[in-house]
Image (spheres, rainbow, N blue to C red):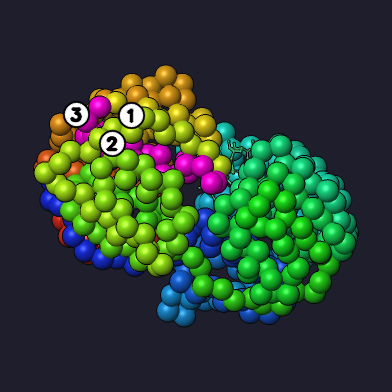
């Protein structure tokens, strides 16, 4: 078993360039299917979810490869429209391939992506959007059978701004002749990046970043090129690590505007945060405790990101006073709390609400990651805790953090991965 061992209680100091964003690169990889030719994604993070996406693309008949930090996909010839169950299960967001397979081949077969560590993960909004574009979707015990000889334009209304459903709808709509309007769209920066990439492939898309996305579909698309944006959640995680341990860090390669709700709360808790054109610097005096923040409620962008909830909670475990978290996005996103309690945190939960009463310090413990961001939160807690913590469940963390141990080491932490029998 592999363990991430972190010796805490040492202030951080150093500079790190933040990796490319997982939540951007996954829909971009799905989008490559729509173009005949070679697409190139620079600054692509080496994540297990990226490997899973490449395996799906190869299964469908694409050629793929790495060239340094760039990944290329040649989607000129597709030979399959079905994704086998094992590949669907390897990555929860594999449903994002449905729209582009349907758009390119007119039919798609896949099993359900299934529930996940965060609770049930419905895909009804994805399917409703594709049906609006003319897809006939049969839902059976084994999965989905979708057909649409030709997709057609449609008016899509999303009752809630689902990131994945917005992306799936965009990816199908670029292949549907006519003008498709997506109202109630998610406004995340990753949606804007998807629009940029689709445009580089020859698609006509506008409005991403607002609640209405308009697509003039039906153009023949070619390969596209983009440099994947820095990962705002990885950056938020390292900022929370600095908040927990104290010290000063410089994180580059991210747009600080994408992090403003996180940095505002860190500033409120007593950290000195400075945003620059290409990143964030943050300082927390190790001699001065953090202060609790009034209320953190997760919401769709531009609200506070659910993905940063666990890392911020881990930092605020040692803040003076009581912080209240309300998790509005996913049902089971508090699985890190029992582990934080093992490290000495004082946290009560009731449904969606978690009340964190600050303690003077956390102590090291052997803990287990149960999901991706919850695992990252345990690393944050360990950075501030007295002694050496050992975190198991690294496969969750590797879905989204390309080199957590190396980055933390570059920031002055004692972190390494040990193989334990
Ligand atoms: C994406 C992110 C994930 C992030 C989440 C919310 C990726 C790969 N993942 O996930 O890291 O935590 O956004 O910011 O980008 N819902 C439905 N029906 C649907 C789809 C969603 O009810 O068909 C609900 C979900 O259960 C959830 C909410 O909508 O409560 C938001 O989910 P959504 O925005 O779709 O998240 P993902 O795209 O899966």
Residue 28 x, y percent position in the rendering: 60, 64
**Are there few (<14), some (14-19), or many (20+) residues within 10 Å of tag 1?**
many
| Sequence-earlier tag: 1 or 3 | 1
Ligand 1 visible in quadrant:
top right
Residue 191 x, y percent position in the rendering: 61, 57
Gap between marks 1 and 2 measured at Cα: 7 Å
Q: Determine which residue is flagged by label 2.
A: 316
- The boundaries of the magenta stretch are 301-321
Q: Determine which residue is flagged by label 3.
A: 359
Mark 1 CB near ligand 1 (8 Å cut): no
- How many marks the image carries: the answer is 3
Secondary structure at badge 3 equals loop
Identity of the residue drawn at 69% across and 71% down = 199
Mark 3 CB near ligand 1 (8 Å cut): no
Q: Determine which residue is flagged by label 1.
A: 323
| Residue lying farthest to the top in this orientation | 350
Residue 415 visible in the shown view: no
Identity of the residue drawn at 56% across and 73% down = 226
């Amino acid at each position: 078993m592999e363990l991430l061992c972190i010796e805490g209680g040492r202030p951080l100091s150093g500079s790190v360039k933040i990796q490319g964003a997982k939540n951007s690169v996954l829909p971009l990889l799905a989008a490559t299917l729509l173009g005949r030719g070679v697409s190139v994604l620079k600054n692509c993070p080496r994540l297990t979810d990226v490997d899973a996406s490449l395996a799906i693309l190869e299964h469908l008949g694409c050629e793929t490869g790495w060239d340094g930090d760039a990944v290329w996909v040649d989607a000129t010839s597709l030979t399959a429209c079905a994704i086998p169950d094992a590949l669907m299960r390897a990555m929860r967001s594999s449903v994002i391939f449905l729209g582009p397979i349907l758009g390119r081949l007119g039919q798609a077969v896949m099993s359900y992506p299934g529930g996940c560590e965060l609770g049930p993960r419905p895909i009804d909004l994805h399917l409703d959007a594709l049906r609006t574009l003319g897809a006939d979707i049969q839902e059976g015990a084994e999965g989905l059978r979708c057909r649409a000889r030709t997709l057609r334009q449609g008016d899509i209304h999303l009752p809630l701004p689902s990131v994945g459903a917005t992306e799936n709808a965009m990816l199908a709509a670029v292949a549907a002749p006519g003008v498709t309007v997506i109202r109630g769209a998610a406004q995340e920066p990753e949606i804007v990046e998807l629009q940029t990439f689709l445009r580089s492939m020859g698609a006509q898309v506008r409005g991403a970043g607002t609640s209405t996305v308009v697509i003039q579909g039906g153009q023949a698309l070619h390969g596209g090129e983009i440099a994947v944006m820095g990962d705002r959640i990885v950056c938020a995680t390292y900022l929370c690590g600095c908040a927990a341990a104290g010290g000063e860090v410089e994180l580059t390669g991210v747009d600080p505007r994408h992090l403003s709700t996180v940095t505002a709360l860190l500033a409120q808790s007593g950290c000195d945060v400075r945003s620059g054109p290409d990143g964030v610097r943050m300082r927390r005096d190790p001699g001065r405790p953090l202060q609790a923040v009034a209320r953190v409620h997760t919401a769709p962008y531009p609200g506070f990101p659910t993905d940063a909830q666990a890392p911020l909670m881990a930092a605020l475990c040692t803040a003076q006073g009581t912080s209240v978290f309300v998790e509005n996005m996913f049902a089971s996103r508090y699985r890190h709390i029992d582990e934080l309690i093992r490290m000495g945190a004082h946290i009560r939960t009731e449904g969606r609400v978690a009340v964190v009463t600050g303690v003077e310090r956390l102590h090291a413990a052997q803990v287990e990651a149960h999901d991706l961001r919850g695992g990252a939160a345990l690393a944050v807690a360990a950075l501030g805790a007295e002694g050496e913590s050992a975190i198991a469940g690294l496969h969750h963390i590797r879905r989204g953090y390309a080199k957590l141990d190396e980055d933390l080491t570059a920031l002055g932490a004692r972190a390494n991965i040990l193989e334990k029998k």
